[in-house]
Amino acid sequence: MNATELERALDYPWGDDLPAAAGTLEVAPGVKWLRMTLPFVLNHINLWLLRDRIDGRDGWTVVDCCIDRPESRADWESVFATQLNGLPVLRVIVTHMHPDHIGLAHWLCERWNAPLWISGTDYQTARYACEVVNSFGGDRLAQYFASHGMTNAGDLEEIRNRKSYYRNLVPTVPASYTRLLDGGTVTIGGNAWRCIGGYGHAPEHMALYCEALDVLISGDMVLPRISTNVSVYEMEPEADALTLFLDSIDRFMPLPEDTLVLPSHGKPFKGLHTRIQQLHDHHRDRLQEVMEAAQAKPVSAYDVLPVLFKRPLDLHQTTFALGESVAHLHRLWYAGKLKRVRDADGILRFSLPG
């Protein structure tokens, strides 16, 4: 099935309607949908405003923040002026540490004197990434990509010179936080929202489910049109990220099929179980294609790129795609379906056992 056919299997209650620029759509009682632009191929992020009351004060809880750039701050200022009914932001919840989700958390928290709520692992990872010059770039990442078959000297040099990728989008994070724990409950506006931990996409992603509203804020774990990026990088080079991700999305299966899913990218939808099965089918098919490639000859993760990605990729996209290639190879390797050998050039190659 192509992407259009897959989408037709889902129900989009708002059709093609989107929030206006710096405006909102109410998608459930006390739950507003914001949509902000991103300067990437993935050109938007969905953010959520939840009506709240904390310590006797009425206001809003914000879920996710957008990257830190002047355009995003200006969008938020418009939201403050027109969408909050004159009430303050009381709390900032971040589903995970990726820049489009946490980038402006420091600014929102400082502006409103509001606390940050996030998982412990993602908070510490974000704090580390803000403080280390070569996070998400530099020599170690270039060496890692070279070990997985990237040999173009110009590409590797550009990656070496990418010194402050994360800090350019997330200059800092708040100095303290409240920890979200899997299975824990956050009371927002009198409703209980249960935290559902997820792995493989981020170190410790937290989705939020409200049974009273039958609403799931899925973050990046379940997206309606695209498959979530699941990658292995140099910080945890032996990870089995794809297995972690596939096991994690199954944790949403006990929720009702007609749960309203609020994803970070794409449109709110219903058909949660259907979408989870689509994601399993997608990765099953990609894994089979990788197996077929490895039957012909030993392959590196770089060799697998055109197998997994049929479209042209620029270097920025390639860095994400190569991490995904490693994730698919690692799932097969850990399952014993492929073996791994480092060749004379130091490149890791995967082939059939035997």
Image (cartoon, helix red, strand yellow):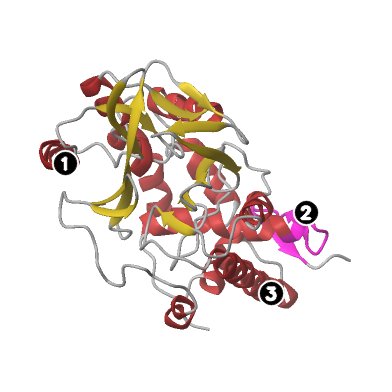
254 lies left or right of 119: right
Q: Amino acid at mark 3?
A: Gln
> Which residue is label 1 attached to?
79
Taking the spot 43% from the left edge, 33% from the top edge, the residue there is 190
Can residue 152 be seen at all in this image of the molecule? no
User: Closest to the observer: 199 or 33?
Assistant: 33
Residue 305 drawn above or below residue 85: below
Q: Position of residue 31 (x, y in %)?
A: 33, 47
Q: State the quadrant of the C terminus.
A: bottom right
Question: How far apart are the two marked residues, 3 and 2, measured between alpha carbons?
Answer: 15 Å
Q: Mark 1 or mark 2: which comes first in sequence?
A: 1
Disc 3 and disc 1 in contact, CB within 8 angstroms: no
Secondary structure under tag 1 reads: helix
Q: Which residue is mark 3?
A: 288
Q: Amino acid at mark 1?
A: Val
Per the model, the C-alpha gap separating discs 3 and 1 is: 46 Å
| Residue appearing at x 53%, y 84% in the figure | 1
> Are the two marked residues, 3 and 2, in contact with CB atoms closer than 8 angstroms?
no
Q: Is residue 54 left or right of residue 121?
A: left
Q: Is residue 11 above or below residue 153?
A: below
In the picture of the structure, the residue carrying the numbered disc 2 is 334
Q: Which residues are magenta?
A: 332-351
Q: Is 350 within the magenta?
A: yes
Looking at the rendered image, the disc whose residue lies closer to the viewer, 3 or 1, is: 1
Residue 7: horizontal and vertical position, in percent? 44, 76
Q: Residue at x 61, y 35 (%)?
A: 182
Q: Residue 328, located in which quarter of the rendered image? A: bottom right
Camera-side residue of 41 and 32? 32
Depth check: 136 or 202 in front? 202
- Type of amino acid at the residue the image marks with label 2: Tyr
